[in-house]
Structures are given as C-alpha cells and as structure tokens.
Amino acid sequence: QVQLVESGGGLVQPGGSLSVSCVASGRTFTGYSMGWFRQAPGRERDFVAAIAWSGNIYYAEFLKGRFTISRDNAKNTVYLQMNNLEPEDTAVYYCAAAPTNWGLTNRRAYTYWGQGTQVTVSS
C-alpha cells in the first residue's frame, strides 16, 4: 500500500507560478513511477506529467513547456513546478503512483492516488 498526500495548491494570478508536491509513504518510493493528473469541473481526469522510476519524463503536449516534474527519492516526494499559469490550468491536481515504467500517460497504469490539491488561476 502506498499513501500519497499532495500539498501546495492555492490561488494564483494568470502568468504566475505555483509548485505542488506529493509525499509518498508505505512502500519503497523508488520502485514506483509517479504522475500528475488534473481534473477540472465537468471534465475527465487528464494526464499532466510523469516521471518513471527509471528517470524518463513525460509531459502532456498542451503544457508547451510550462510545467516541470521532478522527484526527490531521499524525501519520497514528487514535485510539479507550474509556470506561466493560465485560467485553463484551474483544476484539482492529483498525484499518482504506478508500479511500472510503461503507459504512464494513461491513468489506468496507476495503482495509488492522492486526494488532490486545488489550483485556481484567476485575477
């Protein structure tokens, strides 16, 4: 069992930056690939970014280089740095853990999910 707890969400103005983090506990963190997804009201949960335990990184195409995912295995933590935020980025951001290096852009690859943290981009 892996427990995931996100933090760092909040309200930010358009063009601003925000960093969210996710702390994992319960199993060996290095044995899992980690991903970020987001879900806006009335929409499906969409892939944002993933970092495999092998080190490979994947991003959703719509990000256009604005977000950066990283992980600190010593702290059992994965981060998502979000820059140049737009109102369309408003959503609940979820952290997830997958026991695989494959198919990380698909939410079905993930076994464990956090409760989510709200990110609101508004002036």
Image (cartoon, grey):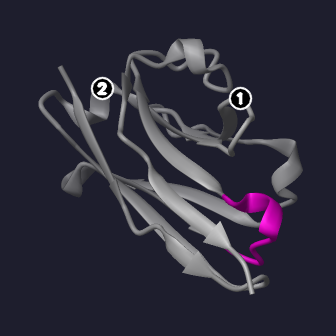
State the image coordinates of residue 19 (x, y, percent, origin top left).
50, 71
Q: Are marks 1 and 2 in contact (CB under 8 Å)?
A: no
N-term mark: 1 or 2: 2
Question: Which residue corresponds to the image point at 59% horizontal and 37% vertical from the top-left?
Answer: 56
Query: Which of labels 1 and 2 is toward the front?
Result: 1
Front one among 50 and 119: 119
Looking at the image, residue 120 lies above or below residue 92: below
For the N terminus, the quadrant is top left
In the image, the segment drawn in magenta is: 83-90
Which numbered marker is on residue 83?
A: none
Counting from the top left corner in percent of width and height, residue 80 is at: 53, 60
Q: CA distance from mark 1 to mark 2?
A: 28 Å
The amino acid on which the numbered mark 1 sits, given as a three-letter code, is Glu
Q: Which mark is residue 44?
A: 1
Task: Give amino acid for label 2.
Answer: Gly
Q: Which residue is mark 2?
A: 31
SS state under label 2? helix
Residue 44 pos. (x, y %): 71, 29
Q: Is residue 83 left or right of residue 79?
A: right
Q: Is residue 87 magenta?
A: yes
Question: Overall secondary structure of the magenta stretch?
Answer: loop
Question: What kind of element bears circle 1?
Answer: loop
- Mark 2 closeness class: few <14, some 14–19, many ≥20 residues within 10 Å: some
